[in-house]
């Protein structure tokens, strides 16, 4: 007897659960609007940081993301093109700066319902311990997100 026959609810949950690690880099610049964001999945990841909100606004208009403040480690990440997302279960960000300091922050889903935007994408507001890239120090980030598909 396999799991599908034994407990179809558990089997269904396993099939719908997704863990997605994403690598993100923010290149330092003294002018916040001149920082450069990149990701290992550029078609899906959009970052809103201080002075750089046009990309996230263009990706999905009217998002309720938090006001980004680089010095306070406050920024938002939109993950799109994932198909039908039911709910964000957990998200955390691991930040490693040049020079070796590492922090782990839990992530909240901001003012969205279950971490989802009106278009069904995932919006996460980050409130990290450290600032997001300084004038001279890049930020290397790994976002680990668990979500459930419909």
Image: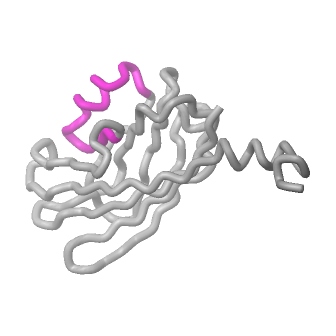
31 up-or-down from 57: above or below: below
The percent position of residue 22, horizontal first and vertical second, equals 38, 54
108 displayed left or right of 101: right
- The picture quadrant where one finds residue 135 is bottom left
Tell me the quadrant of the picture where the C terminus can be found: top right
Residue placed furthest toward the bottom? 100
Q: In which quadrant will I find the N terminus?
A: bottom right
Which quarter of the figure has residue 30?
bottom left
Residue at 56% in and 29% down: 84
Residue 96, position as x, y percentages in the image = 31, 70
- The residue located at (84%, 55%) in the rendering is 2
Along the line of sight, the residue nearer the viewer: 86 or 63: 86
Q: Magenta stretch: residue 59 in it?
A: yes
Is residue 2 toward the left or the right of residue 114 in the image?
right
Say whether residue 32 is left or right of residue 127: left
Closer to us: 59 or 13: 13
Q: Is residue 99 magenta?
A: no
What colour scheme does the image use?
A: one colour
Residue at the location (42% across, 26% down)?
A: 63
Q: Residue furthest front?
A: 1
Q: Position of residue 121 (x, y in %)?
A: 47, 31
* The magenta segment: 45-63
75 in relation to 21, above or below = above
Judge left or right: residue 106 versus residue 9. left
- Measured as percent of width and height from the top left, residue 3 is found at 83, 54
The residue at the point 18 percent across, 63 percent down is: 138
């Amino acid at each position: 007897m396999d799991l599908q026959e034994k407990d179809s609810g558990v089997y269904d949950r396993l099939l719908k659960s997704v863990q997605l690690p994403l690598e993100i880099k923010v290149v330092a610049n003294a002018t916040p609007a001149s920082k450069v964001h990149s990701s290992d999945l550029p078609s899906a990841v959009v970052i809103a940081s201080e002075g750089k909100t046009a990309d996230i606004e263009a990706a999905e208009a009217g998002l309720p993301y938090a006001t980004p403040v680089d010095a306070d480690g406050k920024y938002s990440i939109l993950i799109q093109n994932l198909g039908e997302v039911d709910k964000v279960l957990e998200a955390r960000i691991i930040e490693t700066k040049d020079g070796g300091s590492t922090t782990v922050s839990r992530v909240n889903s901001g003012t969205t319902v279950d971490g989802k935007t009106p278009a069904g994408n995932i919006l996460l507001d980050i409130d990290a311990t450290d600032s997001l890239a300084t004038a001279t120090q890049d930020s290397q980030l790994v976002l680990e997100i668990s979500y459930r598909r419909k």
